[in-house]
Image: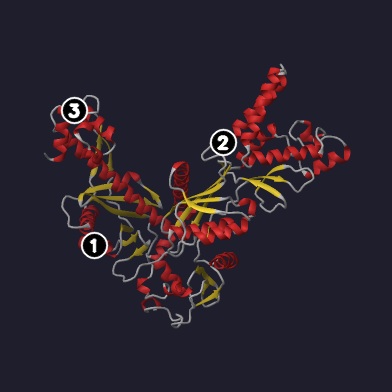
């Protein structure tokens, strides 16, 4: 097997790979490009792939063992390698490069500046010749609402090209112009030149020049009011209100002259979500979320590199801002800046948002990315078709005799070796059965594998207990119904443990000792998302797009969440029990203390002076609380 070999057979001979910058391609036996990468030093970079196979990250190992050859192209500069890498990724769409799975095309606001009388439209087409784009917007209705507000201030053309041509030929206003919805020359109220000036103002406002228009309209309103032209003043007032409504949709977050793109990223081992905020004139003018699936192991810096290439590779110079804000600086930031500068025609800087308003906005973008990533994974596991596919994939990958309709997942959680608890979560037909979740306390244990063995032994013991009838009786003692006691004696088709080979072997021992080896078992190791089976030397690697892997991830994450929640409740009960031993400290004050300090750790670290700041807690009581918690 190729896996047991120290390295791959197509490894280049020593000295064959140059030390120049360049771009490399891995191909399979059929010549298909599997992966494209760039390097400042080709020899140093490629040597990482030809290390002994057992030292490689599992997904990287799968790529190099799938490939049959590697080739490279030397370029003159690092910037040239960046450009060539982007072109080849676009051309070959390699399966092991990061893949942008969110195929949603976002709506934009476009002004058709190449037309004789430019109009404003809502479109998803980014290839309209000469058009100026604003956005993207998260929803179509958001673009329409913005346009409705804007044309009250800047009445530009909104009618179709056919309506415009017909109106200009006949001298009769277009229908939208008759009802006040079109302000172009076809409305017969302005000339082509006057309309072009209004369009220029529209574009200037949307590009961030809102302060100039707000000041000018305010001055005109005051002048009209002073001249007692109240009708004109009311018109200016309404326009100011429309401007405020547009601006309030995008709160001022940075300095008014800030033109930047900000990228918040949330990721796990297999996927990432990028939240892209388009900031012009200090305001968020557009928002876009993109889901990315990763095949081989890459760092956050490498992911940022790929995101920037994808975002700006086909962008026009006007769409590239002077500042790009990222969560982590890519290794080749200087080369990316030079590449962006060449495309924009002006200086571009890449920075990490570390402090102030930029940092706060980055936190907002990252939070949105985290929520989008969670939603992406949840939707995949809750969809019926996806659930059915997940169970079928699991059956095939784990070589089960039947689809695992009932799956139980176990996780062990502890706090520095104390307060050891375990959780059992249950999924039936791919959906959580929260009414059947269970928690276990572990009084004494040596390590996580011992804890897992104990918990599984206790859980499996229920499978052999006989069902006990439960009788429901009326007040007179007559039996009305007889039913079976609902408890977790149901036999799972699959047990999943959070962990790798050691945890799986501990669980397998529990199954053997309990006499239930007919139950299938696997473990999912979080770091590499490997699926381990008992007695196997190597893990099962599920494809990154596998519905089965998403289901296992959801099981593992849910078991971990449930274990942590149970542990926190126990710790809270424990601290309440300890505090109740302090004379003069009742339930109300205990709850107030925990609410005030926010956590048990903060309360334990508090000084008597800090504790006494709580209303109703004097210095003497504060000293008693501090002494009791510190063991004094």
Q: Given the current orientation, which residue lies at the most extreme right position?
A: 170
Residue linked to disc 1: 506
Q: Is residue 74 above or below residue 332?
A: below
Give the number of the disc on residue 249. 2
- In the rendered image, residue 337, in percent from the top left (x then y), is placed at 54, 58
Q: Of label 1 and label 3, which has the lower sequence position?
A: 1
Q: Are marks 2 and 3 in contact (CB under 8 Å)?
A: no
**Disc 3 on helix, strand or loop?**
loop
Image depth: mark 2 or mark 3 in front: 2
Nearest the viewer among 546 and 260 is 260
Q: Quadrant of residue 410?
A: bottom left
Image depth: mark 2 or mark 1 in front: 2
Q: Is residue 162 left or right of residue 26?
A: right
Q: Residue at x 35, y 71 (%)?
A: 55
Residue linked to disc 3: 586
**Distance CA(mark 2)–CA(mark 1):** 56 Å
Q: Is residue 354 above or below residue 589?
A: below
**Distance CA(mark 2)–CA(mark 3):** 49 Å
């Amino acid at each position: 097997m190729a896996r047991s070999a120290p390295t791959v057979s197509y490894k280049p001979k020593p000295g064959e790979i140059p030390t120049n910058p360049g771009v490399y391609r891995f191909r399979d036996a059929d010549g298909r490009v599997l992966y494209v990468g760039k390097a400042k030093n080709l020899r140093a970079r490629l040597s990482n792939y030809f290390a002994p196979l057992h030292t490689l990250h599992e997904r990287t190992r799968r790529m190099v063992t799938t490939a049959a050859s590697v080739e490279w192209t030397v370029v003159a500069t690092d910037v040239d390698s960046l450009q060539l890498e982007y072109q080849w990724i676009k051309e070959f769409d390699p399966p092991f490069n990061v893949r942008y799975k969110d195929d949603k095309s976002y709506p934009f606001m476009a002004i058709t500046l190449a037309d004789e009388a430019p109009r404003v439209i809502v479109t998803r087409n980014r290839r309209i010749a000469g058009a100026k784009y604003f956005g993207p917007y998260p929803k179509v209705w958001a673009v329409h609402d913005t346009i409705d507000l804007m044309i009250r201030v800047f009445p530009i053309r909104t009618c179709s090209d056919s309506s415009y041509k017909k109106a200009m030929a006949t001298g009769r206003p277009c229908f939208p112009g008759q009802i006040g919805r079109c302000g172009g020359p076809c409305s017969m109220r302005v000339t082509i030149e006057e309309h072009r000036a209004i369009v220029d103002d529209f574009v200037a406002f949307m590009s961030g020049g809102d302060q100039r228009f707000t000041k000018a309209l305010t001055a005109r309103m005051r002048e009209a009011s002073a001249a007692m032209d109240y009708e004109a003043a009311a018109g200016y007032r309404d326009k100011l209100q429309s401007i405020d409504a547009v601006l309030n949709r995008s709160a001022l977050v940075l300095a008014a002259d800030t033109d930047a793109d900000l990228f918040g990223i949330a990721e796990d081992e297999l996927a990432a979500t990028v939240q892209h905020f388009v900031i012009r004139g200090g305001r968020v003018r557009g928002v876009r979320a993109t889901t990315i699936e990763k095949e081989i192991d890459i760092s956050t810096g490498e992911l940022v590199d790929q995101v920037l290439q994808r975002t700006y590779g086909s962008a026009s110079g006007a769409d590239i801002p002077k500042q790009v804000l990222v969560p982590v600086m890519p290794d080749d930031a200087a080369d990316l800046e030079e590449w962006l500068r060449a495309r924009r025609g002006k200086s571009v800087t890449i920075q990490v948002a570390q402090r102030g308003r930029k940092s706060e906005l980055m936190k907002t973008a990252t939070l949105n990315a985290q929520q989008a990533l969670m939603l992406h994974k949840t939707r995949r596991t809750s969809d019926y078709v996806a659930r059915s596919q997940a169970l079928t994939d699991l059956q095939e990958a784990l070589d089960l005799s039947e689809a695992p309709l009932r799956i139980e997942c176990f996780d062990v959680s502890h706090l520095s070796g104390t307060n050891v608890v375990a959780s059992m979560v249950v999924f039936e037909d791919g959906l959580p059965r929260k009414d059947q979740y269970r928690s276990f306390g572990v009084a004494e244990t040596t390590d996580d594998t011992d804890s897992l063995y104990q918990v599984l032994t206790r859980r499996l013991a229920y499978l052999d207990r006989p069902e006990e009838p439960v009788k429901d009786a009326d007040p007179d003692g007559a039996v009305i119904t007889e039913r079976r006691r609902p408890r977790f004696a149901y036999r799972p088709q699959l047990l999943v443990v959070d962990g790798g080979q050691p945890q799986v072997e501990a669980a397998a021992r529990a199954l053997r000792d309990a006499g239930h080896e007919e139950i299938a078992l696997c473990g999912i190791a979080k770091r590499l998302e490997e699926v381990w089976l008992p007695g196997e030397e190597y893990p099962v690697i599920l494809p990154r797009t596998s519905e089965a892997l998403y289901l296992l991830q959801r099981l593992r994450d849910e078991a971990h969440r449930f274990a942590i929640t149970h542990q926190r409740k126990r710790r809270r009960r424990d601290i309440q029990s300890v505090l109740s031993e302090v004379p003069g400290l009742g339930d109300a004050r205990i709850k107030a203390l925990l609410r005030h300090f926010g956590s048990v750790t903060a309360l334990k670290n508090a000084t008597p002076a800090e504790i006494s700041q709580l209303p109703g807690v004097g210095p003497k009581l504060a000293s008693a609380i501090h002494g009791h918690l510190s063991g004094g």
